[in-house]
Image: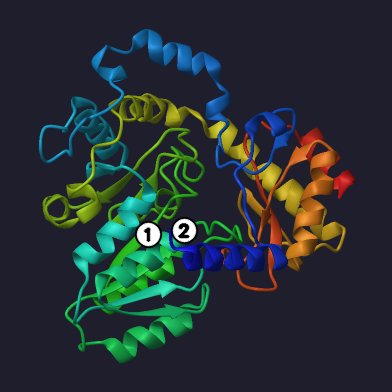
Amino acid sequence: MNTTFYQSIEAELDELKAECRFRQLRNPASTADLINLSSNDYLGISLRKEWLREFIDSATVDDLAMSAVSSRLLTGNHQAYIELENDLSTFYNGRSALAFNSGYHANSGILPAIAGKGDLILSDKLNHASIIDGMKLSGAEFKRYRHLDYTQLEDFLCVADGKYRRIIVISESVFSMDGDVADLKVLNDLSKRYGAILCIDEAHSVGVNGKRGAGCCEEAGLIADIDIIIGTLGKAFASSGAFAIIRPELKDYLINRVRPFIFTTGMPPINAAWSRFVLQKMPNLDVERQHLRELGDQLRNGLRSKKLNTLGNSQIVPLIVGENHVANELAEKISRNGFLALPVRPPTVPPGTARIRFSLHSGLKTAEIDKLLECL
């Protein structure tokens, strides 16, 4: 046994503890009685036990298959994936859909598939780690423009014009840590003007934004315009997996080029079947979407009225406290008052911006937000 290796590991763990950045898995029983303000179950679908009963009662034996036991390109292309992709295509106005095992697989796989040496990727500085990893894996040159700074993005596009085989612009629509929203119309206009490929990650807006829950791209009227729309099924859909909305020829290309798609066993078919079940109900959840927007406004306005530092304009409401130990202590105090609201620290967010990230869902009541504000 290599004792030097384990000593170095222990030293790094000690350093994390000293910096108040040490993380541990939680026992769910220890937080079962708390009001959960840290999940991504934005529409409270995981709490709808009647939906689960309805799904099971209507499901076939094939729908309940627990594993594809193969990659989709071998023998694992289960009928549940085909039906989910067909329904997603209908949901997105006839555009092609391709299912992935996770949003991380989609982002870290699609970028290396479409970009390489001689290409340029321009990414919002606060994009998710999966996008950063995808850029690094691609081998393409990449630059990160200042968060939501489209003047700097245009400067990059102008300088790059004509110098690369492909230019890809990529952004989240709702940003997972600050809770603010990208201007998709500006991104689309700039991408068209400079001939760039536009990719929008809708992880935190699918289900939540748009009249039917098709995300910020629907809200902006741009479903047909954006080259690649990435949606996640593990958040507002309370399922597992992800999908890309693309043109048919790009779907064929990705099937042949995306390594996490080619070399991974397909997601459990039961998840694909459940996602399809939820998708069919998604257009009818506008009351829940409106209530969620109102909850976000209530909490954010309440924090501002108390002169507390917050950001954004979505169902994700950060309370910026600065130092790691302050965030840890505040989370503990909040839990003693009946709420589960976890600290977010570097490297997830920049140093000096540790925070409590309140991630709201439509099952919450306004009185519970009032109680949280009183506690704070």
Q: Position of residue 346 (x, y in %)?
A: 61, 66
* Residue 1: image location, x then y, percent: 43, 58
Residue at the spot x=82%, y=43% of the render?
Answer: 372
Residue lying at the far top of the rendered structure: 57
> Residue beneath label 1, please?
200
Q: Dot 1 lies on which element?
A: strand
Closest to the observer: 165 or 339?
A: 339
From the viewer's perspective, is 228 left or right of 361? left
- If you read the primary sequence from the N terminus, does the residue marked by circle 1 or circle 2 appear first? 2
Please state if 82 lies on the left or on the right of 203 as rendered.
left
How busy is the neighbourhood of tag 1: few (under 14 within 10 Å), some, or many (20 plus)? many
Q: At label 2, which amino acid type do we have?
A: Ser
Q: Residue at x 75, y 47 (%)?
A: 298
Q: Position of residue 102 (x, y in %)?
A: 36, 45
Residue matched to label 2: 173
Which amino acid, mark 1? Answer: Ile
Q: Residue at x 63, y 56 (%)?
A: 313
Marks 2 and 1: in contact by CB < 8 Å? yes
Q: Out of 80 and 223, give the one closest to the viewer.
A: 80
For the residue pair 204 and 184, the one nearer the viewer reads as: 204
Label 2 neighbour load within 10 Å: few <14, some 14-19, many 20+: many
For the point 65% across and 69% down, the residue is 15
Horizontal and vertical percent position of residue 187 = 39, 69
* Res. 140 image quadrant: bottom left
Q: Is residue 37 at all visible to an observer of this figure? A: yes
Residue 123's disc is none
Q: Residue furthest bottom?
A: 159
